[in-house]
Amino acid sequence: MRILSGIQPSGKLHIGNYFGMMKPAIELQEQGEAFLFIADYHALTSVRDADSLRQMTMDVALDFLAAGLDPDKTAFYRQSDVPEVQELAWILSVITPMGLLERCHSYKDKTAKGLAATHGLFAYPVLMAADILSVQSTVVPVGRDQKQHVEVTRDIATKFNHQYAEVFTIPKPSIRDSVAVVPGIDGQKMSKSYDNTLEIFGAPGPLKKRVMKVVTDCKELEDPKDPTTCNVFALYNLFATDEEAVDLAMRYRAGNFGYGTAKKELLSKINEHFAPMREKRGELEKNMDFVEEVLRKGAKKARAETQKTLHAARKAVGLE
Ligand code: ADP
Ligand code: TRP
C-alpha cells in the first residue's frame, strides 16, 4: 500500500486539524509506504505574502515532526521541491474536461468565503491529481471535504490510461468518517476561516482565554446539564479516556457542577496532551538545519518517483 496525503500551509494548526488530519496521517506511517507533503503550491491560491508563506511552511514542518511524524517511515516534503509535479499537472490538464472542474464544490465555496477567483483556484483539483498520481499512490486519506477531488483524480487517471497508455495507478480515497467534525469555540466546525480555533502550539495565555470562551448554554450552576449537546464536553471527549468521559458526563447530569470547572478540566487535558509535543517543537526550532534536511531527504524520494511517472507520461503523449 502506498499512501499519500498533503496539507496546505495556510494557517496555524488547530485541534480540528490535529484530530481530523494530523493524527490519522501520522498513524498511517505504520501501515504502508507513506508520503506526506506540505502543499505550498496550493497555498499560493490564498497566501499572498512571501514571508508568511515561508514561515507557515516551516511551521507545518515543525508541527508534524513535533507531533510524531517519523521521517524514516514517511517521506515528508515540500511540494515545491518536486517541480516536476507542475509538468505532470499540465499534461493532465489538457485532457481534463471543463465540466469536471465546474462540478467541484471547493471553487464555489472558497470564492464565496472571499478568496480571489483565479485560474489557479479553479484548476487546483488538477494539481491535486498530479500530486496523487505522481508517486503512484494507492490510498489517499482525506477529510470528507476532499473526497470529490480524489474522485476527479480517478476520472482523469482513467481517461489518460484509456486514451494513451497504462501510466497511472488508480487511487482510492480513504475517508476519515470516524473522526467527527471537531467543534470550534463557537460550536461551528473548528476552522481558521471562522476564527474559532484552539491552536495546538499557541501561547498558554491566549489558549486559556479561548477555552474559557467556549460557548455553552446558560443553565444555572445547580441545574443538571446535558453533556451530549455541550461543546466543552465534545472537546474534552477527544482527549479523555472512556472512564474520564463517563465520569464528567455523570457530573454534568448530577447538577451543582459549573461549566467553568469543565473548561478548566478541558484546558488541563489539552495542555497535558500537547506538552510533550510543545517541548519537542521547542527543541526542533533550535535545529532548523535538521528540519531542512528531513524535507530535502523526503523530496529526494518523492522526486525520484515523480520523475519516473513523468517520464512514462511524457512518452505516452509524445513529448519523448
Ligand atoms: P481549516 O478549515 O481550518 O481551513 P483545512 O480546510 O485547511 O482547515 O483542513 C486541513 C485538514 O484538517 C483537512 O484534512 C480537514 O479535513 C481537517 N480538518 C479541518 N478542520 C477540521 C475539524 N473541525 N474537524 C475535523 N477535521 C478537520
Ligand atoms: N487540497 C488538500 C486540502 O486543502 C491538500 C492537498 C493537496 C492534498 N494535494 C493533495 C491532500 C493530495 C491529499 C492528496 O486539504
Image: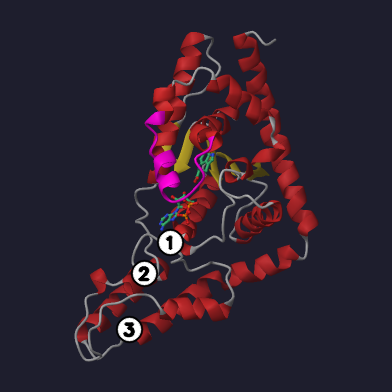
Front one among 261 and 178? 261
Residue 236 percent across, percent down from the top left: 38, 72
| Horizontal and vertical percent position of residue 31 | 51, 43
Closer to the eye: label 3 or 2:
2
Quadrant occupied by the C terminus: top right
The answer to which of marks 2 and 1 sits earlier in the sequence is: 2
To which quarter of the image does residue 278 belong?
Answer: bottom right
Q: Which element is circle 3 on?
A: helix
Residue 31 belongs to the span the image colors magenta: no
Mark 3 vs 2, N-terminal side: 2
Answer whether labels 2 and 1 touch (C-beta < 8 Å). yes
Q: For the magenta stretch, what is the residue range?
A: 102-118
Nearer to the camera, 113 or 281: 113
Which residue is at 35% across, 76% downward? 244
In the rendered view, tell whether residue 106 sits above or below residue 10: above
Indicate if the residue with disc 1 has its beta carbon within 8 Å of ligand 1. Answer: yes
Residue type, mark 1 in image: Tyr
- Counting residues from the N terminus, which is met first, the one under dot 1 or under dot 3? 1
Q: Which residue is mark 2?
A: 186
In reply to whether residue 116 is colored magenta, the answer given is yes
Whole-number angstrom distance, CA of label 3 to CA of label 2: 15 Å
Read off the residue under disc 3: 259
Q: Residues within 10 Å of mark 1 (few under 14, many from 20)?
A: few
How far apart are the alpha carbons under marks 1 and 3?
23 Å
The residue that mark 1 highlights is 194
Q: Quadrant of residue 150?
A: top left
Residue 263 appears anywhere in the view: yes
Residue labelled 2 has its Cβ within 8 Å of some atom of ligand 1: no
Q: Can the viewer see residue 1 in this picture? A: no
Vertical arrangement, residue 2 with respect to residue 6, above or below: above
Name above or below for residue 70 compared with residue 246: above
Look at 37% across and 59% down and name the residue there: 189
